[in-house]
Image (spheres, rainbow, N blue to C red):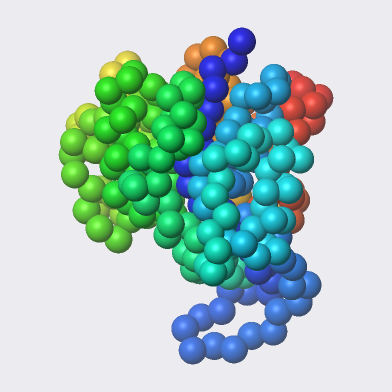
């Protein structure tokens, strides 16, 4: 039986628009093909867990949406992807989180997020009996940075006392410092190269620079630093050393949620007992499919698509 995954994080409606080039400060540009899509780093990762798990009942999500149509859209998308939504609260009088996304002709993006109901995922919410049940029943906790940071602090404290596996995807990069005690309670941290640069204050352009910055994060006590570096693949640093795992070439049209797909897939592979390098390979394959499709949750592949690739 798979170990159970609980994603604690954000749910957003993505207002996604296609542009030729991303706008510069002060510039007005034309966009086209505006879409309202299901997104949010937490929900995207939960959808990836639900779609990629080989077994029903593997993935659940804890979070908050508004009592608007966008909140319902999110719950429907998660349920249809096999995610248990019973721990998602609908908050009356508060809008569902929102993201404003521009995607350029090469698939690169800019994202602005507005927290909305995601701000209601507080440490107090974790104290409620439903939330406690969700955390108690989970074996793997998957976190991001689009809910209040105090909540992530509380989650890792609970997890450290009960021996659960904690994966933190530090996205978006925090605009505040993070205490070393927090890092020391993480089993995996999964920044991309920009987030790693922001967390360490070190340059992260070349593979050697990324390796040095990953090592600096390892010294803070995280057990595994797993850096996602787009088409260059991933870099893993742990007590066994530093390894670069090459990526899988793909014709990218939209990289939105590629990192989320990677994180969800990685958690699924761990839940099935794969070792870390096998899990990275599985996650690389899932992310390579996601960049060939538009949107966030819309781009996340199903398990059968991955099996066909192997
Ligand atoms: O990682 C992509 C996601 O970031 C989008 O779906 C958007 O909602 C923001 O959370």
Q: Where's residue 294, x and y in %? A: 74, 56
Q: Is residue 254 above or below residue 54?
A: below
Residue 145 visible in rendering: no
Q: Is residue 238 above or below residue 95?
A: above
Q: Nearer the viewer, residue 120 or 200?
A: 120
Q: Quadrant of the C terminus?
A: top right
Q: Where's residue 132, x and y in %? A: 42, 32
Q: Is residue 73 left or right of residue 130?
A: right
Which residue, as the protein is rendered here, is positioned at the far front?
129
Q: Which residue is depicted at the point 63% across and 74% down?
A: 21
Q: Where's residue 298, x and y in %? A: 74, 50
Q: Which residue is depicted at the point 29% across and 42% down?
A: 153
Q: Nearer the viewer, residue 57 or 212?
A: 57
Q: Is residue 298 left or right of residue 183?
A: right
Q: Which residue is depicted at the point 73% across and 48% down?
A: 76
Q: Which residue is depicted at the point 41% across and 40% down?
A: 128
Q: Quadrant of residue 169?
A: top left
Q: Is residue 180 left or right of residue 42?
A: left
Q: Where's residue 33, x and y in %? A: 78, 72
Q: How many numbered marks are there?
A: 0
Q: Quadrant of the N terminus?
A: top right
Q: Quadrant of residue 108?
A: bottom right
Q: Is residue 225 above or below residue 165?
A: below
Residue 100 visible in rendering: yes
């Amino acid at each position: 039986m798979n170990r159970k995954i609980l994603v604690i994080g954000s749910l957003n409606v993505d207002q996604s628009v296609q542009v030729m080039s991303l706008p510069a400060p002060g510039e007005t540009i034309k966009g086209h093909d505006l879409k309202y899509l299901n997104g949010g780093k937490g929900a995207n990762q939960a959808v990836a867990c639900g779609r990629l798990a080989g077994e029903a009942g593997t993935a659940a999500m804890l979070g908050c949406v508004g009592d608007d149509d966008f909140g319902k859209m999110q719950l429907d998308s998660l349920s249809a992807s096999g995610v248990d939504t019973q721990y998602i609260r609908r908050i009356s009088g508060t809008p569902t989180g929102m993201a404003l996304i521009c995607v350029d002709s090469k698939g690169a993006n800019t994202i602005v997020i507005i927290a909305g109901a995601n701000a209601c995922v507080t440490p107090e919410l974790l104290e409620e009996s439903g939330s406690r049940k969700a955390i108690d029943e989970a074996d793997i906790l998957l976190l991001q940075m689009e809910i209040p940071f105090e909540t992530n602090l509380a989650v890792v404290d609970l997890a450290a006392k009960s021996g659960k596996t904690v994966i933190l995807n530090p996205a978006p990069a925090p605009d505040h410092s993070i205490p070393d005690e927090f890092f020391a309670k993480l089993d995996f941290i999964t920044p991309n190269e920009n987030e790693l640069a922001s967390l360490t204050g070190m340059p992260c352009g070349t593979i050697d620079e990324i390796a040095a910055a990953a090592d600096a994060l390892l010294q803070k006590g995280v057990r595994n630093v797993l850096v996602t570096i787009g088409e260059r693949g991933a870099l893993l640093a742990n007590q066994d050393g530093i390894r670069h795992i090459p990526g899988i070439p793909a014709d990218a049209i939209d990289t939105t949620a590629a990192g989320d797909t990677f994180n969800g897939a990685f958690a699924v592979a761990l839940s099935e007992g794969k070792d870390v390098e096998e899990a990275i390979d599985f996650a690389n394959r899932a992310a390579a499919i996601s960049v060939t499709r538009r949107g966030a949750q819309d781009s996340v592949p199903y398990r059968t698509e991955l099996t066909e690739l192997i």
